[in-house]
Amino acid sequence: MSIERVLWEQDVTGLAELVHKGEISPPELVDAAIARAEATRPDINAIATPLYDAARARAKATDRKLPLAGVPFALKDLGIGIKGVPIHGGSRIPAFTADFNSVMVERYLAAGLIPIATSTSPEHGLRLMTESARFGITRNPWNTGHTTGGSSGGSAALVAAGVVPAAHASDGGGSIRVPSACSGLVGLKTSRGRVPLTPLTSETWYGMVVDHAISRSVRDTALLLDLTHGADPLSPYAAREPKGSFAAAAARDPGKLSLAIYRKSPLGLPISAETLEALDTAVALAREGGHTVDEIDLPYVGRDFMADFCKSVASAVAGMMRAEALRVGRPVSGEVERATRVLGRLGEMLSAGEVYDAVQRLNATARRMIEETARFDAVLMPIIAHPPLVCGSMDPKGADELIENLLDKLHLTGLLRIKSVFGQLMDKSLWFTHWPAIHNVSGQPSIAMPVHVTADGLPLGIQAAGRPGDEETLLSFAAQMEKISGWLKRRAPLKVPG
């Protein structure tokens, strides 16, 4: 069997075991990953910056006793410091090149992972489809006419295509879970404070952004978390310490769990029959596993909640554009895409008091939700309202142009009908995915599980959200669902290496 075939079939844990046994070497693995990256690159377009030379050098020097010695990996081109590597954030603004590694990157390297590339992202992670003026369209290995989701879509595409068995990802409003749902992969949005973002930043989007990974298997998701979690001295938050290892949690039977299911759209927007079928599949798997599932409603997580989330993001984008202008020494509004510019303009129109008030309302709703759902071990709900969208439909209803024109009129007339603007923004930009931001606000962990494939052959995952700090229950539950469903054996229908 060729090394490329081994890379295609094995997960992170399996590859590391082969290295430890001496059956495969780190240079062989890295060369196979680079060959696969180049073979699939024209089809999926998921690489921002190749790191091939550095990867080959690291592979030759790696200590084979490290936990994940020689396993190829990818790092997202957004919100991360990688010493000497340009980070573009999917933008035409000049790249930022750090002279340090983020703590998380240091932990990846200490475990023996070898980054072969940075993976594509939409501009500043603001789209849940990975398409940018800087890098073009990233495509889904399951069907290259469709999106792989966003904003960690490049990472998802590389994993689904068999280039790497897992890849770094981040999530501020679904950016780990949406690509996982679109690509047939496992994606855990961790608890707030579980993995540090330092020293590049203390927090992003008022603490709503977290970093972890997208992988093929639940055991890999757990093992990667074991190797990267834990606050450092600069961290403003620290998640509750686990009772044991996350890998051990993924390996044990979850017992009989009390689960809930939330079917409604917090935006009141349409949900496809395919999404509801995927949700029913997840419920059936849960009941087969011996768990109880109760229907619940979250009436206070509605349009006002989502509008407040959008306000907080808009203010953060306005601040980001100010920081970028200071970094490059000139205004950047003409270098960013319209969607980014629109959000930045909205953010500048909000007063500091309005933003503070919005964040306080979000936190109050989150506290209520956490208290009222605490009796459940996990809550099942959709991730995406429709199967993976056709590429190029990132602004299918003219949302950006409509809203920018409206902002121009508001500016000219002096009318600041912000509530109306945010309502249109949500309806025209968030109709693809309604739910993920809920748990970015609450700080709860949530795991994307690839439970379903549509009749058209497109993946459609469902999420399970847990109590704050309780990734262990989610990993144990997801591993059981993986075993019952057999999803681990699924692969994108790409040409398989010989």
Image: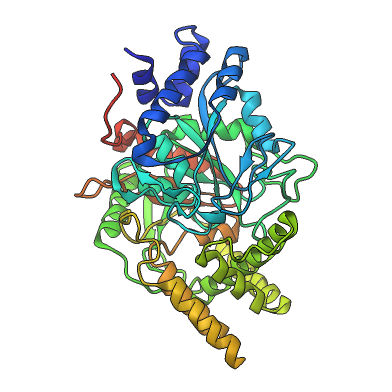
Residue 410 appears in the rendering: yes
Q: In the rendered view, tell whether residue 320 sits above or below residue 411.
A: above
Q: Residue 152, percent across and down?
A: 49, 47
Q: In the rendered view, tell whether residue 137 sits above or below residue 3.
A: below
Q: In the rendered view, tell whether residue 429 sits above or below residue 86.
A: below
Which residue sits furthest right?
A: 233
Q: Residue 374, percent across and down?
A: 54, 57
Query: Where, quadrant-wise, is the C terminus in this rendering?
Result: top left
Q: Residue 11, percent across and down?
A: 43, 26
Q: Residue at x 36, y 37 (%)?
A: 42
Pick the residue in front: 106 or 339. Answer: 339
- Residue 347, quarter of picture: bottom right
Pick the residue in front: 413 or 194. Answer: 413
Q: Residue at x 61, y 19 (%)?
A: 58
Report the number of numbered marks.
0
Q: Residue at x 41, y 45 (%)?
A: 180
Q: Is residue 47 left or right of residue 140?
A: right
